[in-house]
Structures are given as C-alpha cells and as structure tokens.
Amino acid sequence: MSFITTLREAQKKNQSLVCVGFDPELSKFPVHLKNHPDALFEFHKAIVDATADLVCCYKPQIAHFAALSSEESLLRTINYIHETYPGIPVILDAKRGDIGSTAERYAIEAFDRYQADAVTLNPYLGRDSIQPFLDRKDKGVILLCRTSNKGAGDFQDLISDGKPLYQHVAKTVAEQWNEHGNCMLVVGATWPRQLADVRNIVGDMPFLVPGVGAQGGDVEAMVKNGKTVNGDGLVISSSRAILYAGSGEDFAAAAREATLALRDEINRYR
C-alpha cells in the first residue's frame, strides 16, 4: 500500500490530522528516564503507545537522533511503530537534497535502512536531486515549499517572473514532479496567507504543516487557509508541545492529553 493511501486511511480511522514529531532532547526527558540505558527508545515507545489512536503519522527528526549517536534507537522506534501499529505511517524528517548519485544513497538510507514511509527533502538542487525518491512510487516525497522558520522569506519570497520563489516550487512539484501522486509540500502554519496561496496553486495535494505548538502557529487560521474542500489535505505536526507536555512518570498520559486537545481543536475548524 502506498504512503498516501496509508496516510489517508489513518486520518479517516483516527479522525485525525495530527502528526507527532520526535525531536528528542535528553535534558527535557522525565527524571526517571534520564539515566536509563535505553532512554530514547523507551521514551518514544511510551509516547507511541499513548497516542497511536489519535494521530495520522509520526515524524522522527534524524538529526536529533544522530547528534546523540542514537541511530539504532531511531531504527528501533520506526520498527516498533510498523510492527505494533502497522496502519500508522512514519515520515523521516531529514530534509535531504544533493546531486543525483548522492541522492540515490540518501533514498536507500531513508527507505531501506530506516524503512521510512516518506521523507522530507530540499528541492533547490532541482529534479535530478529528487528523482531517486520520486521513483519509489509507494513512498512519500515531501518537499520544502514555504517553511515555518523566521528566515524562510530570505530566499523563498524572492520574486521571480512576478511571483515568489515558493510559488514556483509549488507549481513545479504539482505539475511536473507528482507523476506518481506521491508528493507533498511543507508549508508552515506560521504563514496562513501563504498556505492559502499554495493551496490555490496545487489543488488537493497534501501539505505537511509544521509550526503549531512551540512555534506559535494559529490552528484556526492554518486549517481554514490550508484545508481542501473536503476538510483534509493537511498533516499537522507538533513535537515539543506534545513530547514534553509532562515531565513526571505520567509523561505519556500528558502527551496523550496534548495530542487529543490538538486533534479536537483542528477538527473544530475542518
């Protein structure tokens, strides 16, 4: 089954557009786990068990694991999700982008080594840098378009042929790169007007939307500007606000409450 199909089925089953991001910071872990020899896996396993019926996917950020020399914990976490909750896909947040021969290696890393269902990518080296990912028809290819960070406009808003660069990215992906229907775009919740602009360009193509929670994106504005006519088309990512909702031994229960609250708030505006 393709990533997009699995994602849509999870959204329908769990009535959820929420994606929980895994950005581990050991300093924020509950005290009882900080010295645990397998802290990263145990922390994320507990979060997954507490939220799997409330989300449409999970999104581990590879740098947060690699910086801790914990790639094995990342792999085990993804495997656990696939084995225990097989209807919930996993997006590897890697933001790769390199020349074709190197891109092939990155595709192998994401899809064969880590068994991710989708991966985030930087499109600015052009199609040949993305082609190895596009060729994996059953996998998701999630391309940066208008990102949520403060400096996004430094380049993404530059005017080319009368339009900002991010709109050219959206149009190119929608009209030229999405031949297998496996593309998505990253459009930040912190820019609701740009969400609407991109939605008008690409139709029903799904968006991965970071920026709610700790980054301050407005849920109502984000949903109303980014949703499709059917009230979907969004994968709304929250990491820190869910992972670190609690700091005691009941951290997983607190994460569940935060996930439920976000899911229900999103659904009010769909």
Image (cartoon, grey):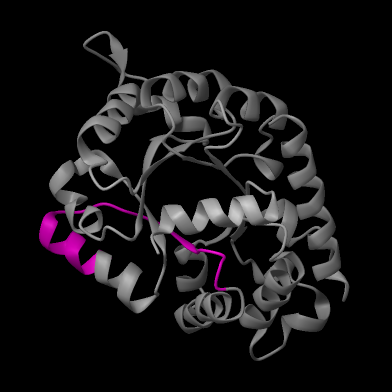
What residue is rendered at 73% in x and 64% in y? Answer: 51
Magenta range is: 86-106
Count of number-bearing discs = 0
Is residue 109 at all visible to an observer of this figure?
Answer: yes
254 with respect to 231 (left or right): right
Estimate the x, y position of residue 234 in percent, counting from the top left: 55, 39
Q: Nearer the viewer, residue 70 or 6?
A: 6
What residue is rendered at 18% in x and 64% in y? Answer: 104
Estimate the x, y position of residue 253 in percent, counting from the top left: 85, 67
226 with respect to 172 (left or right): right
- Quarter holding the N terminus is bottom left
Magenta stretch containing residue 122, yes or no? no
Place residue 109 in its image quadrant. Answer: bottom left
Estimate the x, y position of residue 239 in percent, counting from the top left: 65, 54
- Which residue of the protein is positioned furthest toward the top in this rendering? 162
Q: Nearer the viewer, residue 42 or 227?
A: 227
13 with respect to 207 (left or right): right
Place residue 118 in its image quadrant. Answer: bottom left
66 with respect to 43 (left or right): left
Place residue 214 in its image quadrant. Answer: top right
Is residue 238 at all visible to an observer of this figure?
Answer: no
Question: Where is 244 relative to 160, above or below?
Answer: below
